[in-house]
Image: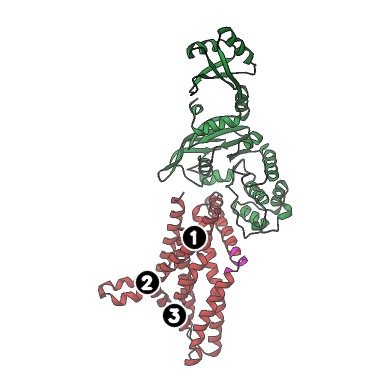
Amino acid sequence: MISVNEITKAYGDVIAVNNISFTIRTGEITGLLGPNGAGKTTTLRMLTGYLKPEKGSITVGDYNASDHPLEVKKIIGYLPESAPIYGDMLVYDYLAYIAEVRGISGTDRIKEIGALCGINEVMHKNVSELSKGYKQRVGLAHAMIHDPDILVLDEPTSGLDPNQIIEIRNLIKVIGKKKTIILSTHILSEVEATCDRVIIINKGSIVADDSTRNLQMSTKQGKTISLKLSGASFSDASDELKKINTVTRVAEVPSDDGLMSLTVSISGDREIRPDIFKLAGAKGWVLYEMRQDQLSLENVFRELTKGGDYANA
Amino acid sequence: MRMLNIQINKLNEARAIMKKELQAYFISPIAYIVITIFLIFTGFFFFKDFFYFGQSEMRNFFQLLPLMLAFVVPAITMRLFSEERHSGSLEILLTLPVTTRDVVLGKFFAGTLFVMIMIAPTLIYAITVFIVGSPDYGPIIGGYLGTILLGASYVSIGILTSSLSRNQIIAFMIGFAACFTLWLIDKIVFFLPNALSILDYFGSDYHFENISRGIIDSRDIVYFLSVTIISILLTVKILDERR
């Protein structure tokens, strides 16, 4: 549906988006995840035709975005961050205006979309009088009024209270059954709750691109065990530990208390702490500390967006 | 035939934007304040000498008008793009399936229509003049035609300066300075050597005076149309380049 090829965008000397490529398939809800300033909004703005990429190309449906911007804009519904809707207009007038510009006729469509987004009771209020949650709903209605194939939402839940967040997420899920949705967020749980697929971006580059389930699986399986021991050299300990079933990696962690500090990575759910205990006893190592760490999606995200070891993995 | 349809459709989008902008003017108090100020000042200058000389003409009125418009029009146009930039709604506007040209045209038509609505009540003065005397038709018709042309070119300049800044006050100041300078040119040329007197041609008031004398010359019309078209094209360019 959408393919983005090596796009780059800089503001002056600051490179906001650096050589990003990804494809988005029809019917998926894709989350663009990253810390503030990672380049999420810039990416979405290029996708929707507000900004022009300096390099690279974007194809939406059958159209190249730089050659046929109007066609692309017809396929896409876009809700920018914090829904910048004209405050001095009535909700109904605003939707009617957007419909007219988009060449859609009929009050029926406005009623229909109003019912879907749950805004029929505020149709005759000024946009500036609405709560943030309602404003966001009006924004969604505005983005969907022409029944677009693709919906692009920039931080759709930012600034909302927890109840409103859940309402908007549910709405996105309902809409997402029929449409291709791309949303950006810096909240990890949002991706877990709503998205089929996640693209993690940091400092203008993609650091991970996988289905949410795969990422969750890999993190659930990825446990590490921290050890502190004495009485063995690192190479001996490492060799012996690697003989234990499911151990994938042993790394030495610098420590300042004269003990050897190790991190043992394992795959799968198997409990190996008894094995380590028995091994230490058999080899005559003195075990000072043993701790199991659960790697959560949160950790993966933090590692990736810090530009840590996982960024190159 | 298909080409023709596309052209008409595109203007439909500009018309939708124009309608929305005109509505926005009359929803907020700004339209009424601007119109009131405009009518008070022009009314004062119309009636100041009206009973004095017993002449049924509108020369005083049209003499002052270019200066009034140089001040009032930027105040009308200052919000057209600055506000969109400031609130972020420009992002929505430019991601709708509308060309930048149609966006600018929509706003330009709204501003020009607003100027026409603003000067419409002054037709009462024209009627008054016709009731009390038998004035020359030419200068009055020419004056109103000139006002529309001048108004349109000032609107396009105001839109251009509005697209430059997200701050409405800055947009207004630059717009006023630009319109005022155009008004001033043919008055400054008086102090310059004769060889430079062709600079007259760049002054808006020089052309306005010609038209409001009742002489409708293509050169004056071309002048106003070129100022308008150049400003509109520059605005489109600025909006496109800033992306």
Mark nearer the N terminus (2 vs 3):
3
For disc 1, the neighbor class at 10 Å (few under 14, some 14 to 19, many from 20) is some
Q: Hue of chain B?
A: red
Tell which of B90 and A66 is nearer to you.
Answer: B90
Which residue is under mark 2?
B203
Q: Hue of chain A?
A: green
Mark nearer the N terminus (1 vs 3):
3
Q: Nearer the viewer, mark 1 or mark 3?
A: 1
Q: Is residue A175 magenta?
A: no
Which residue is under mark 1?
B167
Q: Chain of mark 3?
A: B
Which residue is under mark 3?
B63
Would you say residue A265 is visible in this rendering?
A: yes
How far apart, in angstroms, are the residues tagged by discs 2 and 3?
14 Å
How far from the left and from the top, in percent, is residue A187? 60, 38
Q: Which residues are magenta?
A: B24-30
- Place residue B122 in its image quadrant: bottom right
Please tell me if label 2 and label 1 are on a single chain: yes
Disc 2 residue type (three-letter): Gly
